[in-house]
Image: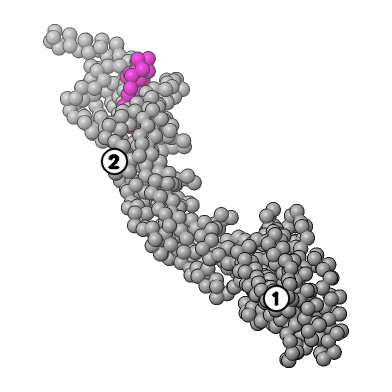
Amino acid sequence: MTNEFNNLLEEDLAGRSLSVGQVVDGTVVQISEDGVFVDIGAKSEGHLELDQIFQEELARLQVGSQLRVRIIKKVDGEYKLSKKSVDYEEAWNKLLEDRNAEREVEITVREKVKNGYMATAYDILEGFIHHTNFKGRPNMGQGYLARVLDLNRKARKLVFTRRDILKREEEEALERDYSLLQEGMVIEGVVEKLSPYGAFVKITDHLTGLLHISEFSFDHVKKPSEVLKTGDVVQVKILAIDRDKNKISLSRKATLKDPLILLLPGEEIDGHVESLADFGIFVKLNGGITGLVHVSELSFRKFGHPSELFKPGDPIRVKVLRVQLEDRRVSLSAKACERDPWEDVYSRYMVDQRVGGVVTQLLQSGAVIKLDDFFEAFVPIGEIADERIKHPGDVLEENKEVEGVILSIDSGKRRIRVSLKRTAESSKDDTTGYIASADVATVKDATPTAGKVTLGDILGSKLDLTSANIKDDSASKKKEKKVEEPVAEPEPEPEPEPEIEAIAEETPAEPEAVDQPEAVDEPEAVDEPETVDEPEPVDEPEAEEPVAEAEEEPVAEIESEVEASAEETVTEPEEEPEEEKESTSTEAAAPEE
């Protein structure tokens, strides 16, 4: 009896010592739908409702488990208990210690909210963490290390941060990935993003390299989207690694076969015009190769700008001139695939041919004229006008049509020389030649057919023979030109005329011989080529020398025959000038008749 009384007295005194808000230890005696009943040392068990305990812990409870609970109220002698209150207080105290010690805690991401996520620490306290604290989207229910950024128990405010941890993790991951990479390696990557200057390719979980637009392909790429798109898997080669700047340079082109190796100089291939420039055209070839056709290699045709011959997209056949692998340059020629018009130049043009053209350029030394689509000619300044000029622009204008006579054709040097002033002279020479031939015919008809041969007969016949032997029209024109210039000066040698006229009056048998002095004037003019050796500067002396030689031969024959006839008729000849011998011979011949 005494023991039972003592026990009941202790229980009553213990129950009286329990108060609301007190934290006590207890033992689970029953688990039911109404809650958990815990023996806390009072007359009756305390009641722990299900909403006052976390579900995770409830699932682990069983009869006999030890719990630490808080008395939240007393109703009709029954104590109401709370396990969450004790757990919250313990968690807040731990977080406070962790923040003061700058320790990391494990948080679990629970749900997505505006600008971030809600996460729990110690599976009890719920706080906010910004989305920038994660690299990418975090997995719900996954645990992450974090630190307490802000803690206010009264306001129940809790904010986590992972910035320092994220930075440390990235540095560790980068160091690990860098140790696996080397320059020159060929690896696979995924295109993450395109930019105007290239593409960013992810080559590891933490490393992204830049693939510059110039390293996309051997072909000229204007936009990265023409070759790649986001998400494409590409094979790239590591060109350079800069750990200090955290940069990796990649190349897709280095993994491809160089199409320039397949090009051989001298090979003719087809392509199409990609673009035009003042200095030439760019031609797109097979394999993504772009070559340059310089303006000097476009065509044998004469043109001002490449747009006069081609436009973008035109098909074209070109010949490979040079391949420079180091500079990545290909020199092409379209002209080399055409037939050279200079091979047929002599079938189009010839010396002394009259041609027309358009003045395209005025130089200090002369003018350039365009004969046709393929040929140009040069007019020396001395062959532009009869008078002396200082510059071709004094007489000519660009884009002006002119006519001239071809002086020479040099197919080796690809040169044609033309004279403009000889065009007018050629017209005069044609008229003069016609009159001279008529005069010779008249004299020939007046030549006596019987009796003694006079000096006029000899000279007239020789002139006929000379004009008959000259077959080349070009040589004849040049000879007449050379004779025409000096003949205008030495007119005055009139002494033979009165003597010959006197002799003609004493000869009644042939009255028509009075016209003979005109034939005598001709050899005097023919003798003048000796003074034509120093004419005005002429560009083509070689072409004039044969003419002078051809003309001197008949003159020499005439002089020799005149001397012979003089010896027959004059008994005592004296050594006098040729002109006096001619007059003496005519005087001696007249009395004999």
Quadrant of res 312: bottom right
* Magenta-tinted stretch: 88-110
The residue to which callout 1 is attached is: 567
Magenta segment main secondary structure: helix
* Left or right: 575, with 119 as reference point: right
Q: Indicate the quadrant containing the C terminus: top left, top right, bottom left or bottom right.
A: bottom right
Magenta-drawn stretch contains 237: no
Q: Nearer the viewer, residue 283 or 462?
A: 462
* Other residues around mark 2 within 10 Å, as few (<14) / some (14–19) / many (≥20): few
**Between 519 and 266, the one nearer to me in the picture:** 519
Q: Residue 529 occupies which quadrant of the picture? A: bottom right
Give the total of numbered labels: 2
State left or right for residue 6 relative to residue 249: left
From the viewer's side, name the closer residue of 513 and 545.
513
**Residue projecting furthest to the front:** 571
Q: Amino acid at mark 1?
A: Glu
The location of residue 436, given as percent across then percent down, is 75, 80
**Residue bearing the label numbered 2:** 185
Q: How is the image coloured?
A: one colour
Q: Amino acid at mark 2?
A: Met
Tag nearer the camera, 2 or 1? 1
Q: In percent of the image, x 40 and y 64: which residue is there? A: 268
Label 1: element kind: helix
Q: Determine if the magenta segment contains residue 93.
A: yes
Say which residue appears at 71% left-offset and 81% top-offset: 458
Q: Nearer the viewer, residue 504 or 570?
A: 570
Question: As displayed, is residue 275 above or below residue 590?
Answer: above
N-terminal of the two: label 2 or label 1?
A: 2
Up-down relation of residue 581 to residue 154 (above or below): below
Tell me what residue is drawn at x 23 percent, y 20 percent. 26
Relative image position of residue 152 (x, y in whole percent): 44, 20
Residue 357's disc number: none
